[in-house]
Amino acid sequence: MSGTVHEIWLTDSAASPMRRVPGGRLVPGVGLDGDRYARGGGTWAQYPDLEKQLTLIDRDDVATVAAEVGADLSPGDTRRNLVTTGIELPSLVGSWFAVGDALLFGMKRCPPCTHLERLTGLKLVKAMVHRGGINAAVFGGGQITEGAVVRPVSDEEAARRGAPTGAARPVPRIVNG
């Protein structure tokens, strides 16, 4: 099963509006070059490094949430970096996956927060509880563009690409089942 990157979003500081970009660079151990978390900021900057490097959300989940809350809600309003289509994001938690040539690891589900409600003025926590996307860590960098393929990567392929194995392999955190 594979999907694609539909949109790429970033902002250079916490609580600033997100802006859509046609492409970007994923930096190992850092995230999306130029984004608030890659720059060391962001509302959740105190969270573990592996949990804040990159966020992904499904385009159809954003549309479903918008319909449920009866409001215009763009993918950028969710403050996630990559908007995907065609891949079940929660299935990537605890696994290696690729976005274009970049190698990532799914660290946890990314539940919504009241900070997002404050920024949007919309009641999103309940509607997004199982549709908030995931957080991922970048282990192998690369350029990405809208339309890039998102696909699972086997442990063997990840190891061949230099990913940590054994006791050094990342450990996902289970949030909201």
Image: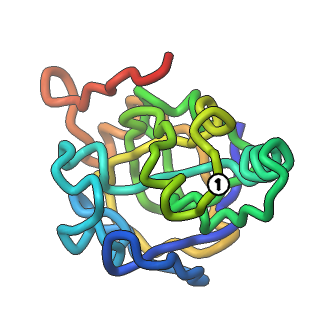
The residue lying at 18 percent from left, 43 percent from top is: 48
Q: How is the image coloured?
A: rainbow
21 sits left or right of 47 in the view: right
Tell me the residue at 62%/45% (across/down). 124
Locate the N terminus by quadrant: top right
Q: How many marks?
A: 1
Side of 145 relative to 153 (left or right): right
Q: Is residue 46 shown above or below 76?
A: above
Q: Which x, y percent locates residue 45?
A: 21, 56
From the viewer's perspective, tell me whether residue 36 is left or right of residue 63.
Answer: left
Closest to the observer: 39 or 99? Answer: 39
**Image location of residue 120, percent across then percent down:** 58, 63
In the picture shown, does residue 145 fall above or below 71?
below
Please say if 97 is above or below 174.
below
Question: Splitting the image into 4 quarters, where does residue 141 fall?
Answer: bottom left
Q: Residue at x 58, y 58 (%)?
A: 78
Task: Give SS at disc 1.
Answer: loop
What residue sits right under mark 1 in the picture? 122
Q: Quadrant of residue 159?
A: top left
**Within 10 Å of the Cα at label 1, are there few (<14), some (14-19), or many (20+) other Cα atoms?**
some
Residue 3 falls left or right of residue 94: right
Q: Residue furthest top?
A: 177
Taking the spot 47% from the left edge, 39% from the top edge, the residue there is 110
Residue nearer the viewer, 7 or 120: 120
Q: Amino acid at mark 1?
A: Leu
Q: Position of residue 171 (x, y in %)?
A: 26, 25
